[in-house]
Amino acid sequence: MPAPASAPATTTDDPAAFRRVLGQVPTSVCVVTATTPQGPVGVTVGSFTSVSLDPPLVVFYAGLHSASAGAVVAAGRFCVNVLAEDQQQVCSAFAGPAADRFATGDWELAPGTPPRLGGAAAWIACDVEESFPAGDHLAVMGRVRSLAAADARKPLVFHRGRLVRLDRACGVDVPTHPFGWWDI
């Protein structure tokens, strides 16, 4: 069977095309939180990934002028709360200018520690390692200090400009081949 024809190539001069093409890459949806002297802060991010196993590093990207991201960096510690598929309201609360973002969701607010979201698919607590401008975003790299995952919870995913759930088929055991680069 012949491969389907590709769409015609476009240049990066068209931001809508850039967004549409990169929207083909599914991403996790996370709320990054920190505790500041003024109280807890948080921001929804769709660009989060691991960087290194040794040392254990992760990075997230937020709008360059995001006050919440700036507060996370200034706090020096943060928690990446990987949203579960039923936590779309939490995503929305932290994506916009809600008056009390932490009123949505079941938050563990302990003094001196970044807020953790109950029922999240996972959480990763980090110390800020460094931050730097990355185009129109701020990259914040963190050294992982502790983490946990809820094996029974599926993550919320952003794909093609929408929040989506993983397909039910993800629970099916499919034969795979190991990635040699993954084990190195």
Image (cartoon, helix red, strand yellow):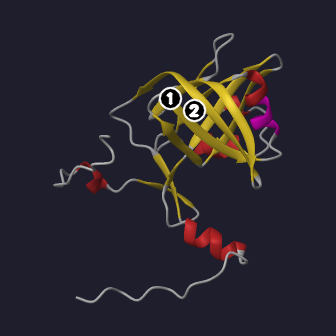
Q: Which quadrant is the C terminus positioned in?
A: top left
Q: Residue at x 51, y 53 (%)?
A: 27
Query: x and y percent of residue 40 in the render?
Result: 73, 23
Query: x and y percent of residue 84 in the render?
Result: 47, 40
Q: Is residue 106 visible?
A: no
In the rendering, which numbered label is found on residue 100? none
Q: Which quadrant is the N terminus positioned in?
A: bottom left
The earlier-in-sequence mark between 2 and 1 is 2
Q: Residues within 10 Å of mark 1 (few under 14, many from 20)?
A: many
**Is residue 164 magenta-colored?**
no
Q: Is residue 150 left or right of residue 75?
A: left
Seen from the viewer's position, the closer of residues 60 and 149 is 60
The magenta segment is 67-71
Query: x and y percent of residue 3 in the render?
Result: 32, 85
Q: Name the amino acid type tagged 2.
A: Val
Q: Name the amino acid type tagged 1.
A: Trp
Q: Residues within 10 Å of mark 2 (few under 14, many from 20)?
A: many
Q: Say which residue label 1 marks.
A: 123
Q: Is residue 165 left or right of residue 91?
A: left
Q: Are marks 2 and 1 in contact (CB under 8 Å)?
A: yes
Mark 2–mark 1 Cα distance, whole angstroms, equals 5 Å
In the rendering, which numbered label is found on residue 80? 2
Q: Is residue 84 left or right of residue 75?
A: left
Q: Is residue 65 above or below residue 81?
A: below
